[in-house]
Amino acid sequence: MEPEPRSVTVLRPRVAVAGMRTYLGLLKARIVVPMVAVALVTAFVAGNGQVPLGIIVALALAGGLASAGAACLNHYLDRDVDAIMPRTRQRPIPSGEVHNPATALLLGLALIGLGLAFASRLSHASLVFIALGAFFYVVVYTGWLKRSSPLNVVIGGFAGSCAALAGWLAVSPQLSLTPVLVGTMIFLWTPSHFWSLAIALQQEYRQAGIPMLPVLLGRQRTACAIFAHTALTFLTSLLPYHAGLLGLPYLTIALAAGFVALLSALRLLAQPSAAVAWQNYKLSGIYLAALFVGMLVNMVA
């Protein structure tokens, strides 16, 4: 039997890698990784740094797979608007890399099912919030509010709060003030983050018919809303310390990061341009990450 030409043997691994990248693109790692991190950090706070390995693995797999499945379904449901917006035209479905959109639908449902199977190894309450997070992101946000209401990212932000609640309840049997405050921080932070993106991409959202706040109210009024939400997030981030739930190391980081976030939001209020909005979008992500780093530092300090 004659050996295959060298070009064929080299091409096959390249095709496999390209295919893997396509399907990884459906999973939205930039959303999945932060959601898993939120759940794990909150779980460690609940357990005072002592969390059984089995719970860590089950929580990471349950949250990661459910989030990835929800992302796939988001790709499927948004395939028409993704084809309109320049920012999203290169996503796997509108670009043609995934030829049959039903592939994303089936993959998404399978991943959510698998994630919930791992979640069944956790507490029933944790399972409920993992399922609720996927439901809010796919059905409430993507399927309903995104195209019908400027409150889409406000109400849809509860999906992120569910990650914190699921992480806490995976370790602790009781829903105490700490996870409620952490979930509230995420809920208040979400609109300011995505409204900043919407200012930067205002024309794209208008062209796609997505009723984001800048499209309906303009940049200046949206910048006011962003500053208000940033201020509320900052004030809420201080409450765990004042309630005696987290210590001085966390407070120090929360104050420093919050001060920078407020200055950035104030700059956007003074100059609501696309460039400044994009910078605030990026910085707001760092701000949220800093708050969770503060929680980790608080445990080891």
Image (cartoon, helix red, strand yellow):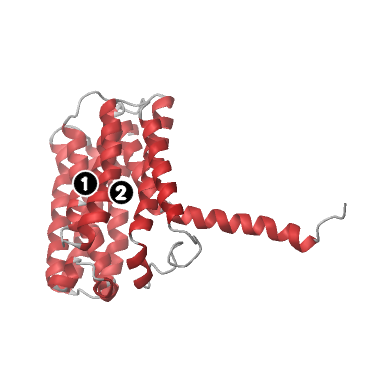
Q: Give the spatial CA distance, label 1 vs label 2.
A: 20 Å
Q: Would you place residue 82 above or below residue 30 in this image?
A: below
Quadrant containing the C terminus is top left
Residue 202 found in image quarter: bottom left
* 296 lies left or right of 212: right
> Disc 1 vs disc 2: which is toward the camera?
1
Residue 102: image location, x then y, percent: 43, 54
The outermost residue toward the right is 1
Image vertical order of residue 130 relative to residue 196, above or below = above
Q: Reading the chain from its start, which is encountered first: label 1 or label 2? A: 1
Marks 1,2: beta carbons within 8 A? no
Element assignment for label 1: helix
Instruction: Identify the residue at horizontal 28%, vertical 53% (top origin).
Output: 287
Residue 32 percent coordinates (x, y): 38, 48
Determine whether 276 is above or below 47 in the image: below
Residue depicted at x 42% and y 42%: 111
| Residue at numbered disc 1 | 158
The residue lying at 32 percent from left, 49 percent from top is 289
Is residue 244 found left or right of 42 in the rendered image?
Answer: left
- Amino acid type indicated by mark 1: Phe
- Name the residue beneath numbered marker 2: 290
| Amino acid on which the number 2 mark rests in the picture | Ala
